[in-house]
Amino acid sequence: MKKISFVIPCYRSADTVGVVIGEIESILDKNNEYLYEIITVNDHSPDHVITVLSELAAQKPYLKVIDLAKNQGKHAALMAGYAYCTGDIVVCIDDDGQCPLEHLWDLIAPLGNGYDISIAKYPVKKQSWFKNFGSKINAIMAEILIGKPKDLSLSNFIAMKKFVVEELIRYKHAYPYVDGLILRTTANICNVSMEERERICGVTGYTFIKSIKLWLNGFTAFSVKPLRIASLVGVVCTGVGVLYGLYIIIHRFLNPAIPAGYSSLMAVLLFIGGMIMLMLGMIGEYVGRIYISINNSPQYVIRQTINLEEETHQQGLTEGRTDCE
């Protein structure tokens, strides 16, 4: 009998995560073909979500709880959950009730038809214009920098085969970017169209700053194209500067009475100076990530676990390393 592992990163969801867990139980208890486990990850939430999870886990041995010592972001929380998965299929869902779990079997079905990953596609996303704009920018970035197919939509409701998760947890560096890891693991990915729900209550904990950090993480963690673009811009600016310099010299010889242009000179200096600082900042971002990786900064730190055996985690990591060797 196959087993499904549900991974739920939790942040500011004390009032909603219990409802999500209850819906998973209701759906899976009606299907005798699958065993299941629910792995919840408290991403150092400021509310009392850890209390809610602890109370539920005391009554449900299949509910696993990972309590992180500090907030490292949703993608780090997902990686923590992946490390403890034991199912043949891993399903990632949100803690706010927006993932349409009534379409769970539709999402899982493509995995039996040759696909390794199945991702929910929402024709209309039930989120603010700001998040829609951020999602659009993130999608364009993923297409240009990490090779996301143009017709593939990324979302938080995902079903994956076990080998994909085992490949993901091989990544040990800080600042994981799950979308990038997924895209570099397999090309057998499909979308399943469904309608996204409204949040059960509350507002998203994904702030503007977190969105910017995710965007920066995405294009610096899995691609050197930004550095190549910076080099290309440098070549273009150099060429423009040389041509403009020749133009000034020739123009000056032909018209000796023309005074030197202070405004044009300052404009060129400011433009070139701005481009240099931008490129240095980009290089600094890469160097900073190299420095953090060399220092072995962890993706996450676990304070405690509930209903989990440490051997399960270590076994998963060992198997991942063995495959890599």
Image (tube, rainbow, N blue to C red):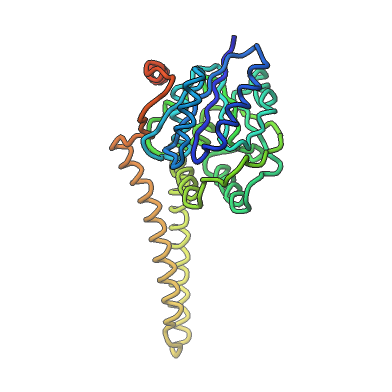
Q: Residue at x 41, y 39 (%)?
A: 72
Position of the N terminus, as image quadrant, is top right
User: On the picture, is 144 further left or further right than 249?
Assistant: right
Compared to 23, does 137 lie above or below?
below
Residue 211 drawn above or below residue 306: below
Could you tell me which residue is drawn at 71 percent across and 34 percent down? 193
Q: Is residue 313 left or right of residue 107?
A: left
- Location of residue 179 in the rendering, given as x and y in whole percent from the top left corner: 53, 36
Residue 289 found in image quarter: top left
The vertical placement of 300 against 291, above or below, is above
Q: Nearer the viewer, residue 227 or 61?
A: 61
In front of the other: 65 or 323 = 65
Q: For this rendering, which residue is in front, 82 or 263?
A: 82
Q: Position of residue 103 (x, y in %)?
A: 69, 28
Q: Hey, which residue is sitting farthest top in the picture?
A: 1
Quick one: which residue is furthest to the left in this view?
A: 295
The number of discs equals: 0
Q: Position of residue 214 (x, y in %)?
A: 48, 45
Q: Nearer the viewer, residue 250 or 106?
A: 106
Residue drawn at 28 percent across, 37 percent down: 295
- In the rendering, at what x and y percent does residue 89 appear? 57, 20
Residue at the far bottom in the pictured view: 257
The residue located at (38%, 60%) in the rendering is 277
Quadrant housing the C terminus? top left
